[in-house]
Image (spheres, helix red, strand yellow):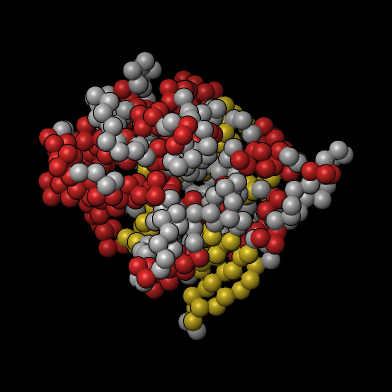
Amino acid sequence: MKIFVNSEVSTLEALLIHSPDSGLGKVVPSKAQDWLFEDIIHLDTMRKKEYDLYVQLLLHFLDPEVIKNYTPDPQRSFFKPNGPGYYKSDKVLDIERLLCEVLAIPEVRIPLVAAVSAIEECSYLEMEHFLKYSDRELSKILLTGMTEEGEMFFPPVPNLIFTRDIGVVVNDHILLTRPSKLARTRESLIAKYIFFNHPYFQEFRHNIIEIEEDEEHFLLPEDKTRRVDTLEGGDVMMVAPNHLLIGISERTTLEAARQAMDKLFQKKVVQKVSIIKIPNKRDFMHIDTVFTPIKRNVWVLLKAIVKPQRNNEEGWRDLQPTPMEEQVLIRTFENTDKGIVCREVENLEALLEDISKTDLACTEKVEFVYSGNDQFPYGEREQWTDSCNLLVLKEGVAIAYDRNDKTNAAFEAKGFKIVKAEDVLSQFQKGTLNPHEMENTIILLPSAELSRARGGSHCMSLPLRRARIFEK
């Protein structure tokens, strides 16, 4: 498979996802926050009425031959990785399918099971009998922590639906991340085994960059709640050829950001890296929860993180949110023949406008669509439910959540067509609409349960290949 990403907005050609597995339905209230959930979700609703529509959209845009014969099935066999009716696209890849195929490699199977038993602190001898299971059954156990009979051996990894966080393709390199929370350790381990061992990625094995813990971390005071070098994919954006953004946030540390930048500069993978420090708050989590690009000249973002709101509506004065601009710091580092040059950027809008004009050679006016249409308190409310976290399928066409009414109205005011996923899919299936002819459209995905998991369509995707933003 060809791996290449040099923008966030060019046509998406291949990506890695993970359909909600049974582990999501086993999250209990007492462990929800430990497993990084704010609430428990209803799994069937998430699967059948929300995520399955997301998968269908992806297939219509990326692999229409696979989806053209799809017929609804109450058993959902089309959507279940490794099942007999599974769609098995080579462009919309599910991590469960890749894990199953990696487990079929004899020299990988035993070390992976041993590694999982080590990090989960359970007996390898107890897990050893899992080796007798089929590749399909074993892959489910490693992801959900339980057998098909319902016996639980270790926790699920419910956050794996957010595949963005396990890695990022930067030009023709793969940056493997290092999660901040212990609940995501197994995700990182499984991702390493897949990227280093699956045939799809063999050509790029030497183009994999890993984030490592500080070499003297063992001399530091032990604190299991916070690692020194942590970086998650939601804090990394390949916004333009040779320009990468890295956020310092609740989940990504300065040390890891510097390590990633140094390794990328050393290998000359990119020329510029902008470091964006955002408030260390659960509200924001990653930079892709406060902004994402939609077109070369259009960005959706939370304005409150750019500058204080000054236009309060009558009656809200006492509820004025604390200004956050002093908590946002931006530095751009450029690797030049004379060494690394650093400059300070005034604010987030200035950075994004410069990316559009300088890095993406955009001559059109740069537009900003604000979360909640920049109305208090809707900006913060809708940002919490991922109004700024959109996946671009092709330039100007993106997937958003249907619940963010005022943000979607703001898109409409900027000339975007707002359509429901169900309506679009119906037209695709009837042949009355061609995905590749769509322009300036926001497709609304049902999101009652998905939004409870605290991640949008951008979080639920790891792009492996996009068309070049500039053809050579």
The residue most toward the right is 314
Q: Is residue 84 visible?
A: yes
Q: Residue at x 67, y 42 (%)?
A: 380
- Residue 393 in percent (x, y) is at 49, 41
Image vertical order of residue 153 relative to residue 357, above or below: above
- Residue 120 in percent (x, y) is at 29, 46
Q: Residue at x 36, y 32 (%)?
A: 23
- Residue 298 in percent (x, y) is at 63, 49
User: Where's the C terminus, which quadrant?
Assistant: bottom left
Apparent side of residue 103 relative to residue 4 in the rendered image (left or right): left
- Residue 146 in percent (x, y) is at 28, 32
Q: Is residue 456 visible?
A: no
Which one is in front, 326 or 341? 326
Q: Residue at x 32, y 47 (%)?
A: 186
Q: Residue at x 17, y 39 (%)?
A: 126
Which one is in front, 125 or 49? 125
